[in-house]
Image (tube, rainbow, N blue to C red):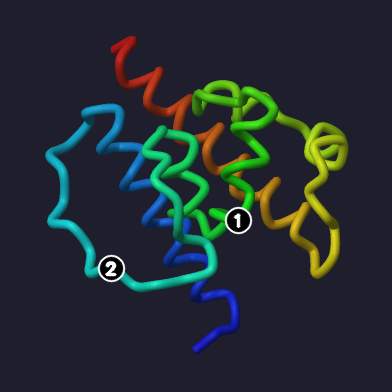
């Protein structure tokens, strides 16, 4: 199994969560809860849910602290913004988070295109 397969799974879960939030399809059956370092806390905001589903739950408080409360706001964040927020680049975290944000941008744009049809 490729080493990135876990990232793909989390990305697909994030896409499904976005579709659920946007109301594009009926909610899927809840996944079994698995304890992880990304989970924790009681923040049920769309940003928090997206961060957790994309594997970046550890940054939930950081995004909340800097008043990033909507997925649209997250989609506008650039690499430099993440560095200023304090997201470390150790282990390529900035790059992986930017890739997830790129996927979010695509998903939001695709959703907007579907609503404009």
User: Vertically, is 2 above or below 14?
Assistant: below
Q: Residue 33 carries which label?
A: 2
Work out how far the residue at label 1 is from the one at label 2, CA to CA, in angstroms: 17 Å
Q: Is residue 100 left or right of residue 115?
A: right
Residue 101 location (% of width, % of height): 61, 41
Closest to the observer, 20 or 32: 32
- Tally of marks: 2
Residue 48 location (% of width, % of height): 47, 41
> Dot 1, crowdedness within 10 Å: few (<14), some or many (≥20)?
some
Q: Name the residue under label 1.
A: 58
Residue 13 location (% of width, % of height): 37, 56
Closest to the observer, 76 or 88: 88
Q: Is residue 72 left or right of residue 43?
A: right
Tell me the quarter of the picture where residue 82 sits.
top right
Residue 83 location (% of width, % of height): 86, 42
* Residue lying at the far front of the rendered structure: 41
């Amino acid at each position: 199994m490729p080493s990135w397969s876990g990232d793909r799974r989390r990305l697909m879960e994030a896409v499904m969560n976005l579709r659920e939030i946007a109301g594009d399809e009926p909610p899927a059956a809840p996944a079994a809860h698995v304890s992880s370092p990304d989970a924790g806390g009681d923040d049920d905001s769309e940003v928090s849910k997206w961060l957790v589903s994309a594997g970046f739950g550890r940054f939930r408080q950081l995004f909340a602290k800097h008043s990033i409360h909507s997925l649209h706001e997250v989609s506008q964040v650039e690499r430099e913004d993440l560095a200023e927020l304090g997201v470390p680049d150790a282990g390529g975290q900035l790059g992986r988070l930017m890739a997830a944000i790129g996927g979010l941008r695509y998903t939001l744009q695709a959703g907007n295109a579907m609503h404009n049809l």
